[in-house]
Amino acid sequence: MRFQTPLEPAILIRRYKRFLADIQLPDGTEAVAHCPNPGSMMGLATPGTRIWVEPNTDPRKKLKWRWRLVEHESGDFTSVDTGLANRLVKEALIAGEIAEFAAYDTILPEQRYDGKSRIDFLLRHAGLPDVYLEVKSVTLSRTPGLAEFPDSVTARGARHLGALARMAQQGHRAVLLYLVGRTDAQSVTVAADIDPAYAKAFTDARAAGVEVLAYGTRIAPQGATLGAGLPLE
């Protein structure tokens, strides 16, 4: 997936009110950018960080810039757009690029299930069990090479695991896919110290038959695509 408009480098001044960031452009001009990440963004919002922003030419939108990437000192990138994970997974599912689901020919996004919940993707194919696929965007890394989820307490994430467990117990395939939105990760783990309740829900879900997958992301200022599978620690 290519970014619609070529990204431009900038320096982060500060992130505030969850969805706003003050930035400095290469010519020294300061501007306000939209931050498409309501989470904690632990380790990604340090003032002075080199970032990449997308210019917005739509006159209907108030802000002229959208924060897309963090560039680390190593030259690696992290996507700060939480919505990118689902878009990349959908693109990969349609192209048959995720081996675990290559046999499924019907891809239904945002389907209701388990009461009032919505699953990111419902996959179907004649003669095969339905797949309830939940995607989580992973951006935290406190140890080199190791990505972690979550980066803050997530009661919603624990609820999703409970719903997936119930689907598995009913005979469906229930799958949690961690999409790691950073290029410096070689493996993934659950950050149990940040959210012990989520860690317990994760353990219970796996015991109930929920499958867990992790994939990386190839990221550059030109765009992003699904990367290789990653092991779970």
Image: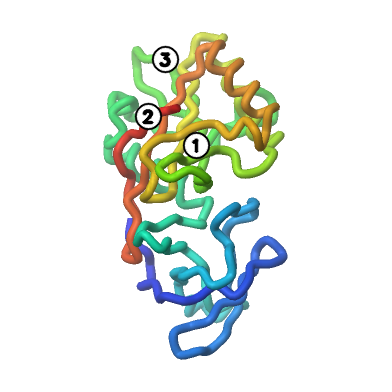
Which residue shows up at 69% across the image and 39% down it? 153
Task: Name the one closer to the observer, 4 or 38.
Answer: 38
Q: Is residue 97 visible?
A: yes
**Which callout, 2 or 3, points at the residue further toward the start of the chain?**
3
Task: Name the one closer to the observer, 127 or 135.
Answer: 135
Q: Which residue is mark 1?
A: 135
Point out the image quarter for the N terminus: bottom left
The picture quadrant where one finds residue 165 is top right
Q: Tell me the element at label 3.
A: loop
The picture quadrant where one finds residue 187 is top left
Which residue shows up at 59% across the image and 56% down it? 37
The picture quadrant where one finds residue 75 is bottom left
**Which callout, 1 or 2, points at the residue further toward the start of the chain?**
1
Q: Is residue 94 left or right of residue 201?
A: left
Color scheme of the displayed model: rainbow
Relative to 103, residue 2 above or below: below
Q: Which residue is mark 2?
A: 231
Q: CA distance from mark 1 to mark 2?
A: 16 Å
What type is the residue that disc 1 sits on? Answer: Val
What type is the residue that disc 3 sits on? Answer: Pro
Relative to 201, residue 48 above or below: below
Q: Which residue is mark 3?
A: 129
Which residue shows up at 44% across the image and 48% down it? 181
**Which callout, 3 or 1, points at the residue further toward the start of the chain?**
3
Task: Name the one closer to the observer, 217 or 55.
Answer: 217
List x then y, in percent, for residue 231.
Answer: 37, 29
List x then y, in percent, for residue 101.
Answer: 34, 27
